[in-house]
Image (cartoon, helix red, strand yellow):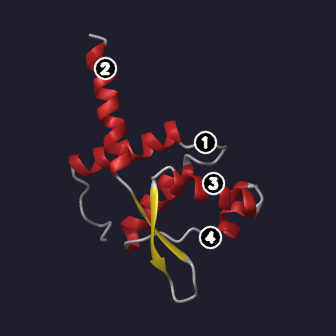
């Protein structure tokens, strides 16, 4: 993925819906961060590697807490493991369907209130 390319309006909406859905639906103090972290790395290199030790230290939580947070994003369908690196680290990609689902529900609520 080449993040030097111009971000289209369609891509912007796709990405923002995905992150907004994560903000509203993922639980825990740091759950909302996972979609944004995965999206950023996915754009830059085609997948994300979430190092629990590094993230835990950065956000001031235990490694196990961060592992649970990441696993919660997997279980909720916001990220998907696509394989492993040579050193055994999980590689993740965003599941934009969750953002599309959130957008559809949002639009339904907005049109239903008119």
User: For numbered disc 1, what is the local secondary structure?
Assistant: loop
Q: Position of residue 31 (x, y in %)?
A: 59, 48
Q: Which numbered marker is on residue 110?
A: 2
Q: Could you say which is closer to the camera, residue 94 or residue 72? A: 72
Q: CA distance from mark 3 to mark 4?
A: 12 Å
**Mark closer to the observer (3, 4):** 3
Instruction: Tell me: residue 29, above or below residue 2.
Output: above
> Which residue carries the number 1 mark?
27
Q: Which numbered marker is on residue 69?
A: 3
Q: At 29% across and 34% down in the image, what residue appears?
A: 104
Q: CA distance from mark 2 to mark 1?
A: 24 Å
User: For numbered disc 2, what is the local secondary structure?
Assistant: helix
Q: Is there CB contact under 8 Å for labels 3 and 1? A: no
Q: Is there CB contact under 8 Å for labels 2 and 4? A: no
Give the image quarter of residue 94.
bottom left
Q: Which numbered marker is on residue 51?
A: 4
């Amino acid at each position: 993925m080449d993040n030097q390319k111009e971000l289209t309006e369609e891509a912007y909406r796709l990405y923002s819906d995905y992150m907004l859905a994560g903000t509203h639906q993922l639980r825990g103090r740091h759950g909302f961060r996972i979609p944004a972290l995965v999206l950023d790395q996915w754009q830059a290199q085609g997948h994300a590697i979430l190092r629990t030790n590094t993230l835990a230290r950065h956000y001031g939580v235990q490694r196990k807490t961060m592992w649970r947070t990441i696993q919660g994003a997997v279980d909720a369908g916001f990220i998907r493991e696509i394989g492993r690196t040579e050193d055994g680290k999980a590689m993740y990609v965003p599941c934009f369907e969750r953002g599309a689902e959130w957008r559809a529900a949002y639009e339904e609520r907005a049109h239903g209130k008119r």
